[in-house]
Image (cartoon, rainbow, N blue to C red):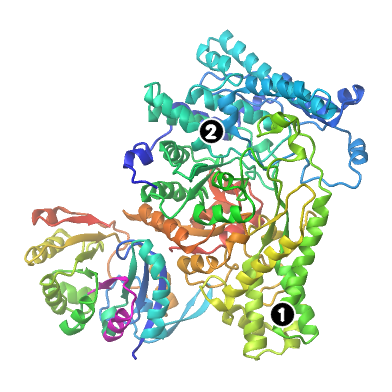
Amino acid sequence: MLTGTIFDVREFTVHDGPGIRTTVFMKGCGLRCSWCHNPEGLSPFPQVMKGSAGERLVGQTFTSRELATRLNQQARLLKIAEGGVTFSGGEPLMQSAFVAEVIDQLNELHVTLDSCGNAAAEEFMRVASRCDLVLLDLKLADPQEHLRWTGCDNRLILHNLGLLAATDIPFIIRVPLIPAVTDTDQNLLGIARVLAALPRHPCVELLPYNQGARAKYAACGMEWRPGFDENIPYRVNLEPFKEFELEASLA
Amino acid sequence: MKILESSRVTGGNEMLELSPRLAEMKHNIREGKHHRFRDADTPDLVTECDAEHLSWNQRASRLSRRMCELERVIIEPDERIVFTRTIRKVPPLYSESALRALTVGRTFHELGPISNICADWGMILSEGLLARKQTALSTRERMHSDAAAVEFLDCAIETIDAVLTLAARYATAARKCGREDVAVILDQVPGFPARTFHEALQFLRICHSVLWLSGHYHCGLGRLDQYLWPYLRDDIEAGRLDYPAAGELLAEFFISLNKDSDLYPGIQQGDNGQSLMLGGVRRDGTDGVNPLTALVLRVACAVALIDPKINLRVSHDTDIELLTLAARLTRLGLGFPQFSNDDVVIPGLVAAGYEIEDARDYSVAACWEFIIPGRGMEVVNIGAASMPSAVDLAIREGLAAGESFEGILDRVQFHLVEQVKRLAERSRKLFLPPAPYYSVLMDGCLENGCDLSAGLKYNNFGIHGAASASAADALAALKEFVYDKESVEPMRLLRALEDNFANDEELRLRLREKAPKVGNNDDRADQWLVTLFEMFAEACRAAGENGRGGGYRPGSGSAMYYVWLATGHEGMQEPVVGATADGRKSGEFFSSSLAPSPDVLVQGPLSVLQGFGKIDYKRICNGGPLTLELSDGLFRGKDSLRKVGLFIRAFVESGCQQMQLNTLNVETLRDAQRHPERHKNLVVRVWGWSGYFCELDEVYQNQIIGRHVYGL
């Protein structure tokens, strides 16, 4: 049986899929998005966070059975609330075998994968094929820009997007609106172009940028250097998507 | 519930906004502009009644009469539902010494006068006061040889006449100032049955106000959407009224309920029991949800004041649209609606001896206790058993005696039984003073020639089991470390409890951080919660008859006891509880009603629902809500209201009995402490009621800021 490292299991989440959900935040991420709001999810290892309320160890190890048991205990309430379980992070695909093993032990729960898609195709599909919904982040269309802002190009992500679009697994594309980084007309148009070329058109959700990551960085012993001006209001432009007849909305 | 079209459930989906007229009225009332009318004299009742050698009954009706007579008539040009109170104080009926002499060996409940019950408003509105008078007269004829009955009925009639005279004076004055619209309504009500929604509201306004004038308090409004719906339905069908116009009238009525909050007695301002119940089934078991149910929710959203306090009955088949609408009100952060689960409450009431039709007709008292409008003379909160005290005494005694864990549990049971016995003994001395006016509004008093204070169909007393989660946590920590793991010597724990962990911070942290806690759906803690309530229910059952033909109903509320048990209060018999085995230091607050202990880490709201869902509520029918605070951030996002609606559905599924959802933003509350002038209208839920945050004592403010907030 596999074990996984998790930095939070949050109940009553409402932004990560249909209905009321319990979201499992998997620790570890291959990207280093400069705006990341979960710095405690970056490292795959347990770490100590020092906040105003004192120290706290972040990163708990579960066997797949332990986690599945805990999630299954809530199955009745999650089902009545039209929800289920969401795997988020960090990047859940960094622990894809573990996540897949947990999903296999779930008691007919609706499962959502919330991922940036940056994983080998095999790992991506291993989890995605077990899910009822995939929320796939697409931050930047241009590979160079992607590299610049996330530390990694988007080659794997776009490849996995293509694979996903060729299946019948429901999916939604989510674009975080980072002021003057991802919210530019050029980027949104680029994303729309990529999506329009897919064999089936996904819905697009634009995620508003929220300030407030700074304190968490300090607690993780990291420096908050977003590299863009947080105080510029993010722009919401749905036109590029409309142009390609894609359904888009602000989440 | 049957499948309902959305418009039938919600009476239209658009949200209401206060008209400029009502916005102004609300503003003026919040500013206290109507206080300038409060210049009428308080009658000197004692002198008058002593001179005439009046009995208690006669004094009570004289009070209603004099108050009605001395009330000045106020008709503001913008009002369509009239009555403004002008007498500030309700005078006493006896001098203090006379009262003492009359009640030797007896105790009063709280302030004395009958409170915290609910009239049969539906009956009153449909019969009219003149028909009630006729009933009183027929009974008087039938029982003419029964002096006590005759005196009671004469007193009841005196109060009816007083209310009718007051209404007639309002009608005359209205005509004089050219308000024929007001006068015409007052020609009809409250003497004759209401014919329209407007008449019903005016009827209710006057009769409810006179309850307060007669010295009663926590005057409930009952199942408002049930008893007012026939009037609204008829108006709509006849084309006299549409939903927006009905909403306008209802909003004015709601605003009027806030006029005198500052004159009402309560622990803190806002604790005034003007609660109403929505939804649920009818007496015959069919679905009672109607368009007025939704209209009340929408109007309450628009009015956004502390009164009336809204309760909503829900069950496994409550329409998600209604739940979503309720969530809209939750989002405002007023701390209501409070939800009660018909699937749990009704069987609980039946198990406690209520007839099924009555059980289906339940409403709430001021805060959360389940009562039957018109049919109960119950005293739902005669006191609280201190669960932390029972557990703490048992632990200290048991540790000192080197006892087994089972031995300690036996002691817990013993102490709970003793506490309930003491409360019960005291309650048998309870004296309920005559209430001729309230009797007019109840079922059977006039018919039987018997005052309300002598009892009605249901006469139970309620006792709450306060601070249950903290008490369960203490048992869980004890079991885990002293008995299961044997990692803590009994004497070490005892010493630490005695000196408030002054020399053993390491132990305190272990008890606090590493022991199982209620709130995590962890049987190692939850089983003691279940056990404590079983013991408590048993103790209430064993307390027997209450001297009034009722028994003792156990509940799970804590009212102000989460503070009092920790810090002491003159109004409380139980001792202050010092440091406890869950690692809580002396002076720290306990859990409030049903909620995890303050400051313990919990998995989240679903685990909380599941943990508290384990309690056998069939035996705990007095009520007392699971209390959850939601971050206002949860409400950002397009589907958020519906999702909170789904959470209410999960609450029903979990088998919990009653739930308060409070929406708050901790930063806003902190800012309100620093700058009260900027947050005058900030409303929060305190325990069974909502009040203005800036008008609360700091201790209650801080408790609210320290609660568990979900959805951050």
Relative to residue B617, is residue B422 drawn left or right? right
Given residues A183 and B41, the one toward you in this image is B41
Secondary structure beneath disc 2? helix
Lower position in the chain sequence, tag 2 or tag 1: 2
Return the x and y of residue A41 as percentages of the image width and height. Answer: 35, 78
Please say if B567 is above or below B33.
below
Left/right placement of residue B597 relative to residue A130 reads right
Q: Is residue A198 visible?
A: yes
Residue B302 location, x and y as percent?
44, 38
Marks 2 & 1 on one chain: yes
* Chain to which mark 1 belongs: B
**Residue occupying the point 44% across, 50% down:** B331
Secondary structure category for the residue under label 1: loop
> Disc 2 designates what residue?
B255
Q: Nearer the viewer, residue B675 or B96?
A: B96
- Residue carrying label 1: B501
Magenta segment boundaries in residue numbering: A97-116
Q: What residue type is labelled 2?
A: Ile
Q: Residues within 10 Å of mark 1 (few under 14, many from 20)?
A: many
Asked if residue A210 lies in the magenta stretch, the reply is: no
Single out the mark in the foreground, 2 or 1: 2
Q: Return the x and y of residue B583 as percentages of the image width and height.
A: 66, 77
Residue B44 drawn above or below residue A248: above
Residue A196 placement (x, y as % from top left): 8, 62
